[in-house]
Amino acid sequence: MSINNPFYHRGAIRRLEDFFGRNAETEQILGLLRNGQSVSLIGPRRIGKSSMLIHLCRPQVRETLGLQPPNTLFVLLDCQELGGSPAEEVYEALLTTLLDAAEEAELDTGNITSPGTYRALDRVLHKISQQEVSVVELNL
């Protein structure tokens, strides 16, 4: 008898149907986030941290706890590509992913004059928070 192995991936699990068995962890993390807590996923390589972050970004996963747009923005950024990058590139990458999520949620982000600065990122975050929207940054 042959059993399908869902862990055939060489990277993070990206398809919803391939992700299962982490309901308690998912609910715990989303519960903490809903209450304004910060959460860090720490563990050895290839244990499923990136798969979990990708899973948490799915609207249908967050919906049960009321953590979907427009009240909450989940912003996923793959920081592996940013290793050794200057601060301006990191700020610009964070800002770009945040603006994409805000646009999708039809939020006002104001005018951005210099996207590669901490100040520009801070202004957009402030503008979003004024609209009573929480931002959850997920970094791979």
Image (tube, helix red, strand yellow):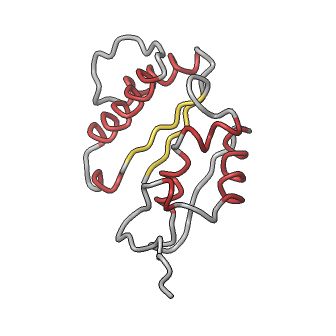
Residue shown at 49% from the left, 62% from the top? 18
Q: Report whether 118 appears left or right of 64.
A: left
Rendering coords of residue 61 (x, y %)? 60, 44
Q: Quadrant of the C terminus?
A: bottom left
Quarter location, residue 86: top left
Residue shown at 62% from the left, 51% from the top? 39
Residue shown at 38% from the left, 36% from the top? 94
Rendering coords of residue 119 (x, y %)? 39, 24
Vertical comparison of 80 with 37: above or below: below
Residue shown at 57% from the left, 22% from the top? 70
Vertical comparison of 120 with 93: above or below: above
Q: Report whether 28 appears left or right of 52.
A: right
Q: Report whether 63 appears left or right of 84.
A: right
Quarter location, residue 31: top right
Vertical comparison of 124 with 7: above or below: above
Foreground of the two, 84 or 49:
49
Q: Report whether 102 appears left or right of 72.
A: left
Vertical comparison of 67 with 84: above or below: above
Foreground of the two, 89 or 44:
44
